[in-house]
Image (tube, rainbow, N blue to C red):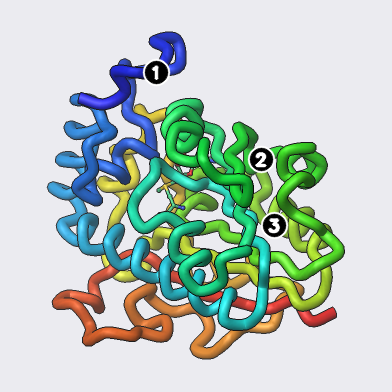
Amino acid sequence: MAGDSFPAQEIDTSRPHPARIYDYLLGGKDNYAVDQQAGDALTAKAPEARISVQANRAFLQRAVRYVVGAGVGQILDIGTGLPTSPNIHETAQQAAPDVRVAYVDNDPIVKAHADALLSQSGETSIMLADLRDPQAIVDHPDVRRIIDFDEPVALFLVAVLHFVTDAEKPDAIVATLRDALPAGSFLVLSHATGDLADRREAQAVYNNASATMNLRSHAEVERFFDGFDPVEPGLVQVPFWRPDTPQPARSEEVGFYGGVARKTG
Ligand SMILES: C[S@@+](CC[C@H](N)C(=O)[O-])C[C@H]1O[C@@H](n2cnc3c(N)ncnc32)[C@H](O)[C@@H]1O
């Protein structure tokens, strides 16, 4: 059972949380019975869910190496999730030790776990904030301490925008963040989809969770990249974004799109 060392008031075990369901699907141990039940209900409705989250995580690692290889020295990761090794700063700093990483999540449990993990490092920080208030993230002193918005930034919105409803205007959220980034910055984004199979029942598993799941089509996800120039191969199912190992079995079933794009102007 997770969380023994964290303040009880921060831990809501009465309903599933996206970060903990994801951790369960990845084989982690920072989750509770409600999250495990939701994860099992999800895989019953969408048998590819486990391979999808693993493929998403592998995409995240490749994208980190790509942006660091392109010379970006700072990463703003919104919707961080529970620490999962290797974390972004570990992969990034392996390639370039002085890369700085600002992590943002709206789940206090994520922050508590990340605080414990990051306490030794001066190059990283985790802050509690909500993607649905993007200007507050850009203005946050803890973000400003790590991120210099006059230098290129890699903005990571990986497996998080599907927790934002259409009514919450995800396009406007991404546009606000984009406008804060200087030219030469990157957007790394992945998003769950129901394009490949009818996943309405799987989506409904999140109706009782702390955030709902909002599956989107390829065209809808592609719109989040407005104002950026796509890096080849564009928006594809995550296993097919610049693979560096042989494709795992059933890659074509993976229900996440992912892509990387660069802000040029
Ligand atoms: C599925 S996990 C993804 C973790 C990581 N980005 C990855 O792809 O491996 C989604 C994370 O987004 C966070 N999240 C959901 N809605 C959010 C919001 N409105 N603002 C900030 N974080 C949010 C959840 O708490 C969770 O930690």
Q: Secondary structure at mark 1?
A: loop
Count neighbours of disc 1 (C-alpha within 10 A) and say few if under 14, some if 14 to 19, many if 20 or more.
some
Instruction: Identify the mark at residue 132; answer none if there is no mark.
Output: 2
Q: CA distance from mark 2 to mark 3?
A: 10 Å
Q: Quarter of the image for the C terminus: give it.
A: bottom right
Residue 146 is at least partly visible in this image: yes
Q: Quarter of the image for the N terminus: give it.
A: top left
Count neighbours of disc 3 (C-alpha within 10 A) and say few if under 14, some if 14 to 19, many if 20 or more.
many
Instruction: Identify the mark at residue 174; answer none if there is no mark.
Output: 3
Pinpoint residue 252: horizontal percent, then vertical percent: 25, 78
Q: CA distance from mark 1 to mark 3?
A: 32 Å
Image point (39%, 44%), residue name:
83
Q: Secondary structure at mark 3?
A: helix
Give the residue pinned by disc 1.
Answer: 6
Which mark sits nearer the N-terminus, 1 or 3?
A: 1
Q: Nearer the viewer, mark 2 or mark 1?
A: 1
Q: Amino acid at mark 1?
A: Phe
Q: Nearer the viewer, residue 21 or 5?
A: 5
Q: Amino acid at mark 3?
A: Val
Which mark sits nearer the N-terminus, 2 or 1?
A: 1
Q: In which image quadrant can residue 39 be found?
A: top left
Residue 166 is at least partly visible in this image: no
Q: Nearer the viewer, mark 1 or mark 3?
A: 1
Q: Secondary structure at mark 2?
A: loop
Pinpoint residue 118: horizontal percent, then vertical percent: 50, 41
Pinpoint residue 154: horizontal percent, then vertical percent: 65, 66
